[in-house]
Image (cartoon, rainbow, N blue to C red):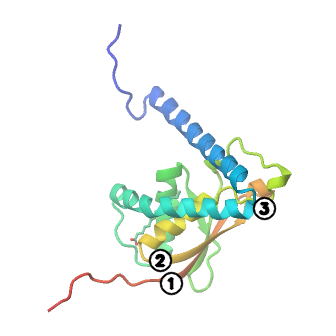
Amino acid sequence: MAPLTAPKSGDALFASVDRVNAELFTLTYGAIVRQLLTDLEEVEEVNKQLDQMGYNIGTRLVDEFLAKSNVSRCVDFKETADVIAKLGFKMFLGVTATVTNWDAEGTSCSFVLEDNPLVDFVELPDTCQGLHYCNVLSGVIRGALEMVSMKTEVTWVRDMLRGDDTYEMRVKLIKQVPEEYPYKDD
Ligand code: MYR
């Protein structure tokens, strides 16, 4: 029998393990949403809960992102948005987003997702029309940004599960809290 070796990135086996994990992740998320719908009954409450779960994840995810990506402090919100769209989404969802629809002040923009692994296999019944199924993602962005001193509001403006042509998340910078130096200079 050939000796067993661990699969390496690029191996066919590794690719299939990645694919199975992505499917497991998608199905697990679906099961969580379904359970919340059963437990909370009100779609609005489920939206809030998914956002809060995402926020909690985002506040932790940001450390892993900063450690793995070696990204240093961004000069402004525009650079931060690009970093999230190109590196953040790629690292945790395996897709990239397009940053678009900037307002004149440079404080609001949209992330457009052509591909959204969270919604594979998902179809919403009529009773769930008000559901923001992907609210965990907007919560993640809000939580992660808060950890780097940016208070934001994140909302979905287009959602293919609601009949739109793509997924568009609007991110509005509310306040940039200056980071305090923890020691007093003498
Ligand atoms: C800075 O400190 O200026 C850099 C800020 C980078 C923030 C990156 C946040 C990453 C969030 C991951 C998004 C995951 C989406 C699924």
Figure check: 175 above or below 25: below
In contact (CB < 8 Å): disc 2 and disc 3: no
Secondary structure under badge 3?
Answer: loop
In contact (CB < 8 Å): disc 1 and disc 2: yes
Q: Is residue 133 left or right of residue 64?
A: right
Figure check: 4 above or below 126: above
Q: Residue at x 27, y 83 (%)?
A: 181
> For residue 130, which numbered disc appears in the image?
3
Secondary structure under badge 1?
Answer: strand
Instruction: Name the spot of residue 24 as percent of width and height, x first.
Output: 57, 37
Q: Residue at x 35, y 26 (%)?
A: 6
Whether the residue carrying mark 1 lies under 8 Å from ligand 1 is answered with no
For the residue marked with disc 3, what is the amino acid?
Answer: Gly
In contact (CB < 8 Å): disc 1 and disc 3: no
Q: Which residue is mark 1?
A: 175
Marks 2 and 3 sit apart, C-alpha to C-alpha, by 28 Å
Q: Which residue is mark 2?
A: 150
Q: Crowdedness of circle 1 by 10 Å Cα count: few (<14), some, many (20+)?
A: few
